[in-house]
Amino acid sequence: MTQAKNPLHGVTLEAMLTELVDHFGWPDLGARININSFTVDPSIASSLKFLRKTPWAREKVESLYLFMRREQARSKAQAQRDHVEPVAAPFGSWASPVTAELIAGASIRLGQIGVLGTDIFWSEGRPQEQGRNVLVWRSDDRRIADLTPAPLNVRSRVHEYGGGAFTLGPKAGFFVNDADQQIWRIRAGEAPHALTAMPGMRHADIDIDATRKRLICVREDHTSGGEAVTTLVAVSLSNGAQQVLASGHDFFSTPRVSPDGRQLAWLSWDHPNMPWDGTTLWLAELRADGALGTARAVAGGPDESIFQPSWSPQGELHFVSDRSGWWNLYRLRGDAVQPLHPMDAEFGQPQWAFGMSSYGFDGRGRIVCTFAQHGRSTLAVLEPETGRFEPLDTPFCAIQELQVGADFVVFLGAIETAAEAVIRLDLASGAHEVLRSTTRHGVAPGFVSTAEAISFPTEHGRSAHAFFYAPLNHHFRGPDGERPPLIVIGHGGPTGSTNAAFKLIFQYWTSRGFAIVDVNYGGSSGYGRAYRERLNGEWGVVDVIDVINAARFLVERGDVDADRVVIRGASAGGYTTLSALTFHRFFRAGASHYGVGDLEALARDTHKFESRYLDKLVGPYPAQQATYRERSPVHHTDALASPMILFQGAEDKAVPPDQAEAMFEAVRAKGLPVAYLLFEGEQHGFRRAATIRRVLEAELYFYGKVLGFAPADAIEPVTIENLG
């Protein structure tokens, strides 16, 4: 009998270790085999000495080495199989492994993150479960488990956009359940159960007041029939009884109890401001009876936006303010507000949801933070007393929901070539671990288009910013002499932004032969307050001009076909889409996802949080009714000359369905090709797998009919009126 050859025969331990270090790097290698000395004293010589006298460690190294060689062989074989000469085929018709089914069926949404000691928690939205949000736990020993069984759905609807739907304590966790908007308690060994029972009340942004055995949170009262009333309330842990702590402002957020339990900090703001326009940071004593002492404003105001007040372990209040024109870190010491590290970068972001976090304190009292600059996120460590500021070298271009443990951080991170994931990063070694990705399946490099950051000239001698993605599919190329069609995307908000992070939905388009430009038009966040305020009074003007100029820039550069430029957008991006199609003869076609067609209708019929948003973006209503009508696409369909497709959720409260329906009827009456798809059970943003799949395929089908190509995918036909 022939004995199997030892796969390690002839390979020295030094050669193995050298190859492993070259492949993984010291921090990742140490984390993978769980040998601390590899990160504490990273040298070949010292590590060889350790391995030669430690058999179990040598076995780990040998096992990882064999794994690495197998993966390298597999990758080489796959590359050889994948190496094919690309076939010329019409743009848009390319067959792609990035299918609508893959995006809808294998993708999840990741949201809020929490840290308790060494345990990590996050919320996970699952389209496969009708969009249900699950609270997930990752224990110190790396077990991962769901904490909230069906039909529980961890989601707040305060401000409609929610956020801040759970919090964690050493003895119990608490979350808001979507169906009743009540606070539920979860403890080890017990089924989750409701703590509060107040129909018509919604809750969010929960903090634990351990000294008084209660919670403090934001409550939104919908029982009066008029505009919802927002307050800060305390909730007894014994019986769920509630006590109003603060009232009298239109909005409240971020109640945070000091470490000694003696003070409460919180934010408030009033109509017509949004939280990125101006908020006030309040501080009050928490009295023995649970009530608040006299509140004093310590920062902020109608023209200063405060973000994420947080207490240091020593009991000093920190916060982010844009008083300098950029969202920077500050500290309240005594009565003085002290800047901690002034720079032209954004340490905060628009507070569209509760519970957003961009910094925290590690076990040494250092501030670990993330900031955005030039469209890219960076992780950094700041020592508050010395002012030492050290950016950390990580591969992540987008970082959100940052939570800080004693010696590690957890965040939602994404790179240019891999999907967003829950990331745990060790602060000592810099090694990171993916705990959960938004997709179960990666995309082969031959189908991944990465972002090119561009700046382009726009109106009034200004520049604006965007990310360009060229079409890429290593099986196909476009016909000789042709340039690809371009999809122009305007992000939602409109006070929001986009980044260079991998987006699976973009690969759906680029791998079929479309180019994409994703535009951070004037009014976007991430570039300072002045850039954000370009849209004040100019919504429907500045954003539209900027998306057109982004496309023109790429046409003039020779990247795309000037005759096949389409535009798509969701929510506020949908309004930009409809306005561009209506008021300009530039785009061949467009797709509006729950977009605004009638500004007057939006001003009259939307939820409280955004009910005065347009005062800044357009002007006070009804005083400037003429401007609202002038900029509403639904009133100017006579100017339309481009086909469009509209997608809408039947239960959308932010942009009600009658907006899309009015636009559809007007375009149909004009005789232009138009399609309208309404989805029951969907709200502002599509969450169900079946909807996500249908929307993607319907949009591709529509573009095929308008631009004259046949998609490779088998797609259920879409009814397009006036197609001729």
Image (tube, rainbow, N blue to C red):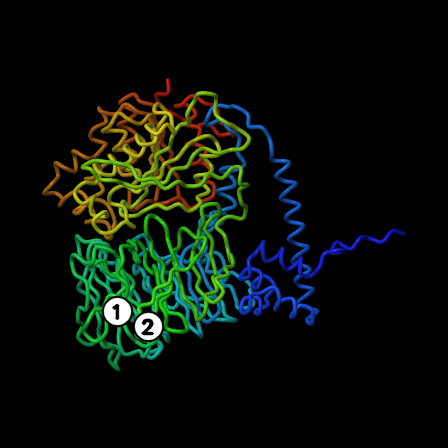
From the top left corner, tell me how far across and down residue 230 is, in percent: 24, 61
- Decide: is 11 above or below 552: below
- Decide: is 241 above or below 665: below
Element carrying mark 2: loop
From the top left corner, tell me how far across and down residue 563 is, in percent: 35, 23
Residue that sits furthest to the left in the current view: 623
Instruction: Judge from the rendering whether residue 585 lies leftward or rightward of residue 626; answer left or right.
Output: right
**Do the residues bearing badges 2 and 1 touch, measured as CB atoms within 8 Å?**
yes
- Viewer-nearest residue: 306 or 557: 557
Element carrying mark 1: strand
From the top left corner, tell me how far across and down residue 23 is, in percent: 58, 53
Give the residue at x 51% y 39%.
101
**Quadrant housing residue 49:** bottom right
Q: Count the numbered circles shown.
A: 2
Label 1 environment density (alpha carbons within 10 Å; few <14, some 14–19, many ≥20)? many
- Give amino acid for label 1: Arg
From the top left corner, tell me how far across and down residue 430 is, in percent: 48, 62
Label 2 environment density (alpha carbons within 10 Å; few <14, some 14–19, many ≥20)? some
Q: Quadrant of the C terminus?
A: top left
- For the residues labelled 2 and 1, the Cα–Cα distance comes to 9 Å
Residue that sits furthest to the top in the current view: 724
Report which residue position mark 1 lands on.
Answer: 331
- Viewer-nearest residue: 546 or 553: 553
- Give amino acid for label 2: Ser
- Viewer-nearest residue: 76 or 407: 76
Q: Is residue 257 visible?
A: yes
**Quadrant housing residue 36:** bottom right
Report which residue position mark 2 lands on.
Answer: 312
Instruction: Judge from the rendering whether residue 286 lies leftward or rightward of residue 23; answer left or right.
Output: left
Q: Is residue 181 visible?
A: no
